Image (cartoon, helix red, strand yellow):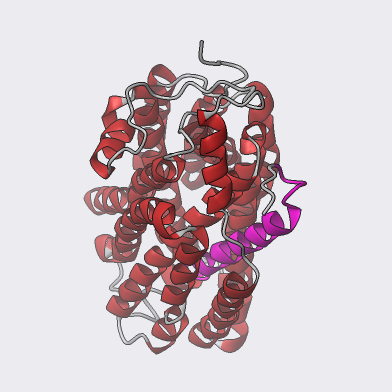
Amino acid sequence: MTIDYGIRANLGQFLQQLLQVLLVGMTIGMMRNVVPALAETEFGVPRGSFMLLAAFVVAFGFVKGAMNFVAGRLAERIGRRQVLLVGWLVALPIPLLVYYAMSWSWIVVATILLGVNQGLTWSMTQTAKLDITRPDQRGLVIGLNEFSGYVGVAIAGVVTGYAAALLGPRTGLLWFGAVVVGLATLLAWLAVAETLPWAHAEVKRHAAGSPAQALRPRYPNGVSEQPSTAEMFALMTWRDRRMAALCQAGLVEKFVDALVWAFWPVYLHQQGVGLPGIGWIVGVYGFTWGGAQFFTGKLSDRVGRHHLNAWGMWLCGAGVALLPLGHGSAWWSVSAAIAGLGMAMLYPNLSAAVADIAHPAWRASAIGIYRFWRDLGYGIGALGLGAAAALGGRLESAFWFVAVAMLLSGAVLYRWGEETHPRLNPAH
């Protein structure tokens, strides 16, 4: 088998992986509009039970974070495609659990399965594309990956809003989820190729000092050729300050997504907005985030990751703070767009920065551990915003908690981090 690198050389598989991540995004998107908005009326959550409302996002975050960690290590042993397929098989019961849910605990169980699905599938779509493309395309690759995924999230939010209004919330989610998960499983089985050979070939090329290795990344020093799980975890979490800065920023930026998922639909529902309207306002955030990543990922390949990441944290936090300060669909939509633009600046480029300075021999593990900390932010953030809302007695307190956290985390990233693009800051 000929091993060529680049988007054009592997266009068929690249497009298959983009379709996979679109369906991954649609799977999580079906749980982000109707379910929280109708938590009280459809699933029995008492009004004002902020911590109970946040429980399903907490469960999702801790499970998805753990699965990201597992997925990275597992993918280096059994391959990317196998992990992807297992992730889809786990998702098959989710639509049925939501349809037959007798209490909020059923939704929590469905969300735990969703966390397993997302941790295994989204990690693999990103890792597989990085395997088959060139180092100078990483910003574009991850931008396209996250563009496709979060456009899928936004589309699902809008479509499920209308489906719930036409068919009823349970029936609408059942049919939408069954089609999306069924199609994704079938395609993963029949059309997706294994990309582990590309990663192995890159390791050999790097070891041989190939002239094609024109870019010289600033890999961490003192890492063994086949690092253990404990060594990788220490490297990513505290030993390398750059990786630690990226991991903490990834964790905190998920506070925003936890807020959007758990509390934005509830807040807008309390303001009198209907399900389709909630879908469109939250969709503005998703569409802006998804669409702008198409440009911000490629932009970071030209101007670097570091400043886009730090300023993205601050802009996203500003959008969160603005939303409860005004009223009306126009105000809420503009606030959502500002938050989405900030997220687009940082989201693909935090991952690209990790990939820049992760050796190909352990890149999947590095991405998995980064994604472990990042998606743990769902759980930690949901606990924090639930506690903030409970202590403040109102949903708005959760918005201030998240905005302040983004401001401080951006400052830590700016101070501890550095430019990772090997062309702009190469190793000596």
The N terminus sits in image quarter: bottom right
The residue depicted at 51 percent of the width and 46 percent of the height is 323
- From this view, report whether residue 187 is shown above or below residue 365: below
Residue 417 is situated, as x and y percent measured from the top left of the image, at 43, 21
Q: Is residue 150 left or right of residue 74?
A: right
Q: Which image quadrant for residue 99?
A: bottom left
Q: Is residue 32 magenta?
A: yes
- From this view, report whether residue 216 is shown above or below residue 289: above
Residue 74 is situated, as x and y percent measured from the top left of the image, at 38, 56
Return the residue found at the far right: 8
Query: In this rendering, does residue 57 appear at all?
Result: yes
- From this view, report whether residue 270 is shown above or below residue 355: below
Which of the pair 410/126 is nearer the observer?
126
Q: Which image quadrant for residue 66?
A: bottom left
Magenta residue span = 6-33
Residue 379 is situated, as x and y percent measured from the top left of the image, at 31, 53
Which of the pair 85/396 is nearer the observer?
85
Q: Which image quadrant for residue 187?
A: bottom right
The residue depicted at 38 percent of the width and 30 percent of the height is 243
- From this view, report whether residue 49 is shown above or below residue 211: below
Query: In this rendering, does residue 270 appear at all?
Result: no
Q: Is residue 35 left or right of residue 190?
A: left
Q: Is residue 212 magenta?
A: no
Which of the pair 389/139 is nearer the observer?
139
The residue depicted at 34 percent of the width and 55 percent of the height is 70
Return the residue found at the far top: 428
- Magenta-drawn stretch, dominant element (helix, strand or loop): helix
The residue depicted at 60 percent of the width and 77 percent of the height is 186
Residue 280 is situated, as x and y percent measured from the top left of the image, at 63, 61
